[in-house]
Image (cartoon, rainbow, N blue to C red):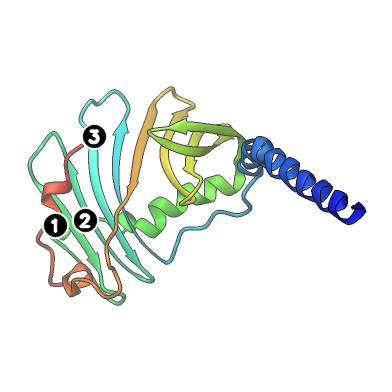
Amino acid sequence: MRVKAASLCLVALAVMLMFGIGLFAPSLVAAADSVTPGELTLPASIAWKEISWSGDDPNPFVLINLIDKDRWRVEVKDTAISKILVVVFDGTQLAASNPKAPKSLDPHLTMGKIFKDLRQAEMVGVEERDGHHCWHYKLSETDLVEDIWVDIPTRFPVHLEGVFKDGSRVRGQYTLLKLDLAGGKPRYFDKGSTEPLFAPSLVP
């Protein structure tokens, strides 16, 4: 009889624990989300679409950025004009549809700067941004105040807003792309491939 009673007590305890975990799980998840995730780094192989606004110009730049280790490709369109700029680096040589294209378009540098800012920024909360559950970071420097929202599951930025000392503003939206960069189209990183491959995607 005592064994049966003890068994019933254990079952009751197990049920209570189950309900307890169920009740407290959301708060535990929220607490985990609010913890600083450690150092965020740019993945070695990644692709994303970027829409960037500068100042009061209503016409954004739209970019498709591809990185596979030291290789990269960028396709850029100023939505105020029709021409598309393509820059490709095959790991050894740079090629572009416009020979005056700057190597500073390297997405290792552009997105790398955002990740560098994240390492110096303070995580101020967890928020919803552009349909993503995000860590919200703020960086305050003498010449720039910058807010960056990082998608928690992917650990990749989805939105940026910055105000410079002179009052000028920048804004960016970022969307990850599912592309097979390592085993995908060889033309992604072929220095002879300076014709746009992503023209239909270069719209806001």
Distance from Cα at disc 2 to Cα at disc 3: 18 Å
Q: Is residue 73 visible?
A: yes
Residue beneath label 1, please?
98
Residue at position x 20%, y 30% in the image: 59
Q: Position of residue 51 (x, y in %)?
A: 28, 39
Residue beneath label 2, please?
101
**Residue 123 placement, left or right of 99:** right
Q: Earlier in the sequence, mark 1 or mark 3?
A: 3
Label 2 neighbour load within 10 Å: few <14, some 14-19, many 20+: some
Distance from Cα at disc 1 to Cα at disc 3: 20 Å
Give the residue type that dot 1 points to.
Asn
Give the residue type that dot 2 points to.
Ala
Q: Quadrant of the image for the C terminus?
A: top left
Residue at position x 47%, y 31% in the image: 128
In the depicted view, which residue is nearer to us: 75 or 158? 158
Residue at position x 30%, y 73% in the image: 182
Q: Is residue 31 visible?
A: no
Give the residue type that dot 3 points to.
Pro
Label 1 neighbour load within 10 Å: few <14, some 14-19, many 20+: few
Residue beneath label 3, please?
60
Q: Position of residue 69 (x, y in %)?
A: 38, 71
